[in-house]
Image (cartoon, grey):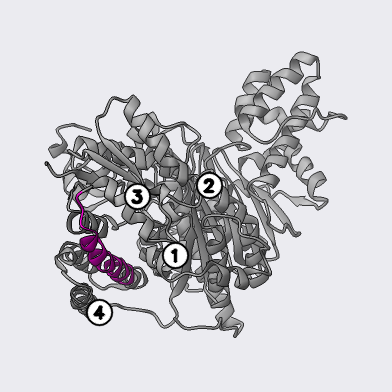
């Protein structure tokens, strides 16, 4: 592993649909600072707030050698933080989780909008799968059902483990699960039994869809927002007959992976915490070149374009304006 | 009598030989449908039964856009799956929408008996010269073979060109030039001229590049709009992309019985349409020590869905990762890109680990 700055540090950021996570690591990949907050539909503001909070808590003299970014807003956040590496969340999570536990064989990851399984052998990813076309069995589904039952989703796990007889809930599809849930509630099943049944349904859905045909071997690590739900953890243990490990820092694995990947590039692209004072603006514009009407998104730093994406062909590149002024809009 | 303006839905770049067949062989005019876009998909999806597959919807969208572009005669072909029923349904939907056109469903002809096509062609142009058709067909088939070979080279090398876009430019010029061929020999020599230019494009090929096999249903795999240009996404990440499925390999040089013999350990009977070829190619890639396999299929494609559990068995037996995609009418590329990037990262890591352990996978190219 390259390490030309023994006193250096690396910043890893994971910007998901629901939450934004960050870690600062040292050369030995120890976590020096970490934080997370809600993305609330604005990745730029979330990252600025996150970085400001972490900057306050870190030794200011410590130099960030480079930034790595992952998560669904990685392209945008990579551009504004001048990251050395922008990585998909599957690779980043695998790198983060295997750094924490070298012997991990299976990583179960259930986030707000997606779920995945990553199989690892000797610290290397050997296979993976991710939910396709459908967000059944993810955090968003649990949140929606919590709302229906009038329970805070954070309390789901604790309530679920009090049930002795989980209500069977159809697990194939979110829509079926929801109608089944309503039906069972109207029949008089207790709330804790229904909640426990939902946790089991999430697990059944995951094992039958995302993990279908994959060999799940111990140690099994469960991460992502849903791993905070003890009801789902227990349901996984019951279904697999294996212990399921939840790291208290499980939600940070993507950010940790991004920091490690930034360190592995061996590149230095220092990051200044003063970035929070810089003005970043994004503008979307539809290309009129053909009926695809690609939406080209440009990001501007102090009025000057630093990156643009969204075009399927070269025609689109000329649609993006070089400066914010040219777009005819102001910050 | 005014010449018919014939059109056929897009499938890769086969509009080039099809236009040639119509113009030179059948003596009709030809309207190439506009390049497929989001609008094609939206139009097709709006007027199709929701549960029909994406190829059905895209074909319908192409017909509508071809009619708007002035086509008055539409053709559909037969096939080994629901495709055989597409024509009747497309015609009915378009009639209900109020378009005026003639529709010829070649599903009645048989690919095994090429002469049966002559009868169908005669319906399109009753005054056609059989001799003309019979002299044109071999040139058309040669063109198909030439284009397939050209694009095979493109897929395997484009990820490594040092000047991005160089090969695509030659490819476009080639497709414009090949219809000027007047004989099989012409088609071959035009192709050779452009192939020379392709081979002259500098490529920086690593000693051990990633090698990926692409498999899937007949339409989705051959149509870059349907598969979200997945071959290009793989190539851009430094992979040699190998796709066997094309018209020459399936219609011209293919023997289903030999395929069945090869895949017998995994499949006892023909599972229909492209299913057995998908399995056969997965097996061939696994045996050749490829780094990974990507399956692309239309959501709901029964033969390809049936192939998935068998692909998993091959993946386990040969320790080769297989990534399966089902495409419907989604247009976002982000999720696909994420999965492709992760897949390439994984293949890269597996390869590095194998090299470290001193296990070189067999095969070189």
| Magenta-span inclusion, residue A217 | no
Q: Are marks 1 and 2 on the same chain?
A: yes
Would you say B94 lies left or right of A324 here? right
Where is residue B179 shown, x and y percent of the image?
17, 63
Q: How far apart are the two marked residues, 4 and 1, measured between alpha carbons?
A: 26 Å
In front: B40, or A58?
B40
Say whether disc 2 or disc 3 marks the residue closer to the N-terminus: 3
Q: Quadrant of the C terminus of chain B?
A: bottom left
Q: How far apart are the two marked residues, 2 and 3, measured between alpha carbons?
A: 17 Å
Residue at the far right in the pictured view: A164
Q: Which residues are magenta?
A: B127-150
Do callouts 4 and 2 mark residues in contact (Cβ within 8 Å)?
no
To which chain does the residue with label 4 belong? B
The residue beneath circle 4 is B199
Q: Are marks 3 and 4 on the same chain?
A: yes
Secondary structure under the numbered disc 1 in the rendered image: helix
Residue pictured at 71% horizontal, 23% vertical = A181
Secondary structure under the numbered disc 2 in the rendered image: loop
The residue beneath circle 3 is B225
Say whether disc 4 or disc 2 marks the residue closer to the N-terminus: 4
The residue beneath circle 1 is B250
């Amino acid at each position: 592993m390259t390490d030309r700055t023994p006193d250096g540090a690396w910043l890893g950021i994971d910007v998901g649909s629901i939450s934004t996570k960050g870690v600062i690591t040292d050369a030995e990949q120890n976590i020096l600072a970490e934080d997370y907050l809600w993305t609330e539909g604005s990745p730029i503001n979330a990252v600025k707030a996150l970085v400001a909070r972490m900057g306050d808590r870190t030794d200011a003299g410590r130099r960030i050698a480079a930034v790595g970014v992952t998560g669904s807003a990685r392209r945008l956040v990579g551009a504004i933080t001048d990251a050395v590496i922008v990585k998909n969340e599957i690779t980043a999570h695998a790198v983060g989780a295997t750094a924490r536990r070298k012997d991990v064989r299976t990583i179960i990851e259930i986030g707000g909008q997606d779920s995945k399984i990553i199989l690892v052998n000797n610290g290397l990813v050997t296979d993976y799968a991710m939910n396709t076309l459908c967000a059944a069995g993810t955090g968003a589904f649990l949140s929606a059902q919590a709302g229906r039952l009038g329970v805070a989703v954070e309390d789901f796990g604790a309530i679920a483990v009090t049930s002795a007889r989980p209500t069977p809930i159809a697990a194939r599809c979110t829509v079926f699960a929801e109608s089944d849930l309503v039906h069972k509630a109207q029949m008089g099943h207790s709330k804790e039994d229904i909640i426990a049944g939902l946790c089991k349904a999430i697990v059944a859905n995951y094992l039958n869809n995302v993990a279908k045909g994959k060999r799940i071997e111990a140690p099994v690590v469960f991460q992502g927002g849903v791993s905070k739900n003890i009801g789902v953890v227990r349901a996984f243990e019951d279904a697999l007959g294996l212990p399921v490990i939840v790291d208290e820092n499980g939600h940070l694995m993507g950010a940790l992976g991004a920091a490690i990947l930034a360190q592995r590039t061996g590149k230095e692209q220092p990051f200044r915490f003063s970035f929070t004072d810089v003005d970043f603006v994004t503008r979307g514009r539809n290309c009129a070149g053909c009926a695809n009407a690609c939406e080209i998104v440009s990001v501007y730093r102090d009025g000057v374009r630093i990156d643009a994406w969204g075009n399927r062909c070269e025609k689109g590149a000329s649609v993006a304006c070089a400066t914010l002024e040219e777009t005819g809009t102001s910050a | 009598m005014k010449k018919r303006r014939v059109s056929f839905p897009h499938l890769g770049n086969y509009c080039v030989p099809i236009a040639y067949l119509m113009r030179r062989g059948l003596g009709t005019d030809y309207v190439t449908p506009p390049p497929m876009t989001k609008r094609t998909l939206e139009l097709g999806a709006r007027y199709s039964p929701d549960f029909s597959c994406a190829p059905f919807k895209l074909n319908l969208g192409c017909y509508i856009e071809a009619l708007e572009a002035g086509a008055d005669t539409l053709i559909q072909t037969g096939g080994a799956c629901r495709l055989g029923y597409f024509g009747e349904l497309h015609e009915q939907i378009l009639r209900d929408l109020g378009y005026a056109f003639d529709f010829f469903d070649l599903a009645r002809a048989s690919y095994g008996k090429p002469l049966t096509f002559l009868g169908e062609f005669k319906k399109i142009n009753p005054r056609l010269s059989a001799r003309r058709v019979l002299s044109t067909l071999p040139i058309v088939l040669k063109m198909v073979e030439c284009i397939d070979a050209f694009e095979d080279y493109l897929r395997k090398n484009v990820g490594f060109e040092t000047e991005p876009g160089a090969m695509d430019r030659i490819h476009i010029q080639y497709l414009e030039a090949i219809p000027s061929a007047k004989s099989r020999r012409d088609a071959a020599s035009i192709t050779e001229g452009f192939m020379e230019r392709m081979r002259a494009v500098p490529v920086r090929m690593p000693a051990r590049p990633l090698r990926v096999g692409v498999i899937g249903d007949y339409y989705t795999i051959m149509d870059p709009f349907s598969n979200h240009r997945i071959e290009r996404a793989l190539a851009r990440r430094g992979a040699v992309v190998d796709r066997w499925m094309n018209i020459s390999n399936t219609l011209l040089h293919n023997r289903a019985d030999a395929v069945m013999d090869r895949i017998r350990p995994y499949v006892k009977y023909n599972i229909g349409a492209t299913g057995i070829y998908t399995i056969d190619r997965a097996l061939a890639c696994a045996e050749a020590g490829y780094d990974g396999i990507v399956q692309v299929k239309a959501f709901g494609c029964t033969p390809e869905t049936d192939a998935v559990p068998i692909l998993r068995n091959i993946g386990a037996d040969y320790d080769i990762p297989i990534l399966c995609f089902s495409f419907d009418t989604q247009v976002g590329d982000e999720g696909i890109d994420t999965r492709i990037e992760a897949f390439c990262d994984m293949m890269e890591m597996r390869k590095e680990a194998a090299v470290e352990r001193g296990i070189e996978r067999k095969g070189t190219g």
